[in-house]
Image (tube, rainbow, N blue to C red):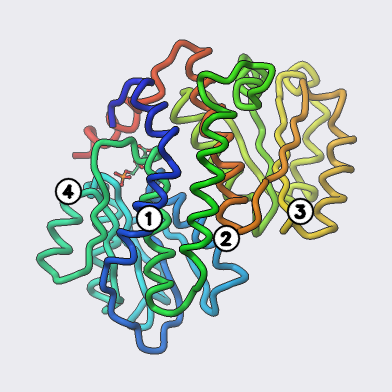
Amino acid sequence: SAMDSTGYFAALAELGTQCRNAYMLGRETRVPAVADLSTVVVTGLGGSAIGGDLLRVYCQERLRVPVTVNRDYTLPAFVGKKTLVFAVSYSGNTEETLSAYQQAREKGATIVALTSGGKLAALAAADGVPVIRVPAGLAPRAATGYLFIPMLAVLEGLGMLDGIEAEVEELARELAHYATTYGLGSPVAQNPAKQLALNFKGRLPIIWGASGTTEVVAQRWKGQINENAKAPAYWNAFPELNHNEIVGFEEPAELIRQLWVVILRDKGDHVRVGYRMEITRRVIEGKVAGVTEVTSTGEGMLARLYSLIYLGDWASVYLAMLYGIDPGPVKVIDYLKGELA
Ligand code: PA5
């Protein structure tokens, strides 16, 4: 996944186009209807799993069956003939995902492979499993369009979701707009992504979302700061964090002064969660280095989630620049995979 920051910026700027192409790839894929479908499982790791979380959150209020994300070698016991499994690995060579794929085969699940190639594409082709083949050459985390939208298109093709095409169009338009706002050419004073990076620099970012909406965005921001800027970050979600994490803002005071908190809001948040966010902000202000509150924009859930994800993506790459780090390579992940090979 080596890529210099120029390539990384280009991939970010083109995310809207990627989402449109990703939708087409999903629609073109023939997936057999699953009789009496009970669950959808997305199995994958890292950049190939976050699309599963996006799907889970997106489907929460729209799909009649639950979506579960599996980040492991093994699948849960409930997986069987009534399960639709998306096996997602950008490289196609992640051992946990290959193992889960084999299990899904043994359990008789209906499988769709989502990959740019590798062993997963070869196995699926040999097994007669539908493959959604996405373009290679990106870092997995720069391919979230490809690793998420095709699953929506497949569920739409199976008659389980509708209106996805219009939502993808709105999303692509929003992303094109934000590519200018957050892009390299936009000066700090008008660029929230650059401002965030400056606030994160030398500090520990804490990203808070809300269950059922922005939780997945918070998780994504954390991963992006880790993988692009090679820096630590943490995430949590309301209302749960009001029942534990919020107590941990007393000691040590000098450590807490190094935290920069981001609160991610969405119009779909429970109204009481909105109050909780405001109260919590008052509780921590003055103790932490600062708090940034961001509210999603757009109408559809897709555009709203991505409006926030996109800001975090850009901010994490700017933070990498501030640290003098190439956002592309993830040497430690490659080292681990190599050691296990
Ligand atoms: O962003 C990354 O490079 C990682 O999080 C990978 O996505 C993760 O290691 C899994 O690899 P793959 O996406 O190829 O299955």
Mark 4 in CB contact with mark 3 (< 8 angstroms): no
The Cα atoms of the two marked residues, 3 and 1, are separated by: 27 Å
Quadrant where the N terminus lies? top left
Q: Residue extending furthest bottom?
A: 36
Q: Element under label 2?
A: helix
> At 73% across and 46% down in the image, what residue appears?
265
- Give the mark nearer the N terminus: 1 vs 4: 1
* Residue drawn where x is 17% and y is 48% of the image: 118
Give the residue pinned by disc 4.
Answer: 118
Residue 215 on image: x %, y %: 63, 50
Residue at the far left in the pictured view: 126
Disc 4 crowd rating (10 Å Cα; few below 14, some 14-19, many 20+) is some
Instruction: Give the mark nearer the N terminus: 3 vs 1.
Output: 1
The residue identified by callout 3 is 239
Secondary structure category for the residue under label 3: loop
Residue that carries the numbered disc 1 in the rendered image: 72
Q: Are marks 2 and 4 in contact (CB under 8 Å)?
A: no
Ligand 1 - quadrant of the structure image: top left
Q: Kindly report which numbered mark, 2 or 3, lies closer to the viewer in this rendering.
A: 2
